[in-house]
Amino acid sequence: MVSVRNGQPVVTDGPFLESKEYLGGFYLIDCENKERAIELALQIPDSGIEGLGVEVRQVMFADGQLEA
């Protein structure tokens, strides 16, 4: 989960929220690595709202492989 608290980025590993309860939408981005995905997630306004955050999840490619 990515969020901004007191002007500083906060990145935590899980537990992930259950999407049936909290999913309000999603962004699908294509970027070179997890660090870049986190940078982009920090620009989403919800990351700065107390009690909210943005989950960053890796997606499987069409060939069935996950990028490390």
Image (spheres, rainbow, N blue to C red):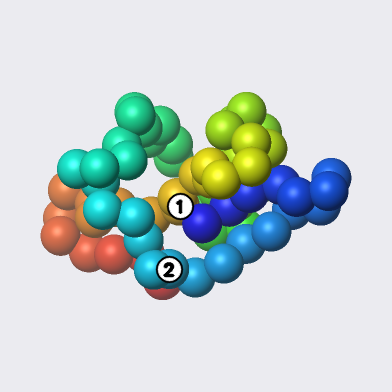
Q: What kind of element bears circle 1?
A: loop
The reply to whether residue 33 is visible in this rendering is no
**Residue at coordinates 45% horizontally, 52% vertically from top-left?**
56
Compared across the picture, whether 52 is left or right of 42 comes to left
**Label pair 1/2, CB-CB below 8 angstroms:** no
The relative height of residue 48 versus residue 61 in the rendered view (above or below) is above
> Mark 1 or mark 2: which comes first in sequence?
2
Q: How far apart are marks 1 and 2 (CA)?
A: 10 Å
| Quadrant holding the C terminus | bottom left
Question: What is the number of callouts on the image?
Answer: 2
Residue at x 36%, y 61% (from the top left corner): 16
Q: Percent position (x, y) of residue 1? A: 51, 56
Depth check: give the residue in front, 23 or 65: 23
**Residue found at x 32% / y 40%:** 22
Q: Which of marks 1 and 2 is in front?
A: 2
Q: What element carries label 2?
A: loop
Where does label 2 land, which residue?
14
Percent from the top left, x then y, of residue 11?
62, 62
Residue carrying label 1: 56
Local crowd at mark 2 within 10 Å, few (<14), some, or many (≥20)?
Answer: few
Question: Which amino acid does the dot numbered 2 rest on?
Answer: Gly
Give the farthest residue toward the front.
51
Q: Is residue 34 above or below residue 36?
A: below
In this view, which residue lies farthest toward the right?
7
**Badge 1 amino acid:** Val
Residue at the spot 63% in from the left edge and 49% down from the top edge: 3
- Left or right placement of residue 20 versus residue 45 in this view: left
State the image coordinates of residue 35 (x, y, percent, origin top left).
62, 58
